[in-house]
Image (cartoon, grey):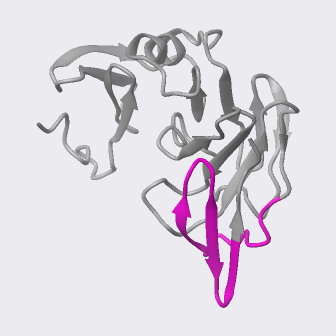
Amino acid sequence: MTLSPEKNDQGRPIQLLSARDGWVTIDPDSSTASTFSENGAPAESFTLKGSAASLLIKDGQQPTLSQFKAAYESGDTSWADIDLTCADATHCSLNGTPLTLSDDVATWNTPARAQFQSSWKLSSDKRTLTIRGRSASSEIGAVFMIDTTSKTPMDPLPITSRGAVIPVWRQNLIVAIDGSTLVGYAPQS
């Protein structure tokens, strides 16, 4: 079942976010989001006037529909264990604590609302958050890591090129290739 068109009237892609209990679509040219039940049935729409968080996580999982709505409609992210919000490509905050990303791993533009919602992994001990700078579906682009306990960026992988190919990206293993260099990394848990 198709929840919404892949692109809006201006030809820009519509974000489709997975929630624990359904789906959320965000049109980048609209001020509203729409929710859908697990079976794809339309649920409700709400105005996007709250948080601009690029990533929200609860209990190591995606938020529920009501949690997404609370964050994006009214700005209530008090329920989130992880709230990553970025003012620009290198200046972010993790749960309100300033976090500066190095140029090596920063994204090309200011991360949009929910930009990383489909491109993150959390280690089993919930200490290491890895995020693909581009998208979860692309094998190309830097991965950056954040120590969620100290709320600081971790030393980047020896390969941090935005053009690096990352064919393996899992909760417990990252493999990156840049030219003839191959690097494997296993976040400690």
Residue placed furthest toward the left = 1
The image quadrant of residue 17 is top left
Tell me where residue 49 appears, x and y as whole percent. 51, 17
105 with respect to 110 (left or right): right
Can residue 157 be found in the magenta stretch?
yes
Seen from the viewer's position, the closer of residues 106 and 58 is: 58
Q: Quadrant of the C terminus?
A: top right
Can residue 173 be found in the magenta stretch?
yes
Tell me where residue 142 appears, x and y as whole percent. 65, 63
Q: Is residue 52 among what the camera can see? A: no
Q: Residue at x 57, y 20 (%)?
A: 58
Seen from the viewer's position, the closer of residues 167 and 164 is: 167
Q: Residue at x 71, y 54 (%)?
A: 144
10 with respect to 139 (left or right): left
Q: Residue at x 39, y 22 (%)?
A: 20
46 with respect to 183 (left or right): left
Question: Magenta span covers which residues?
Answer: 156-183
Q: Residue at x 57, y 44 (%)?
A: 120
39 with respect to 119 (left or right): left
22 in relation to 127, above or below: above
Tell me where residue 182 appears, x and y as whole percent. 68, 80
Seen from the viewer's position, the closer of residues 44 and 154 is: 154
The image quadrant of residue 122 is top right
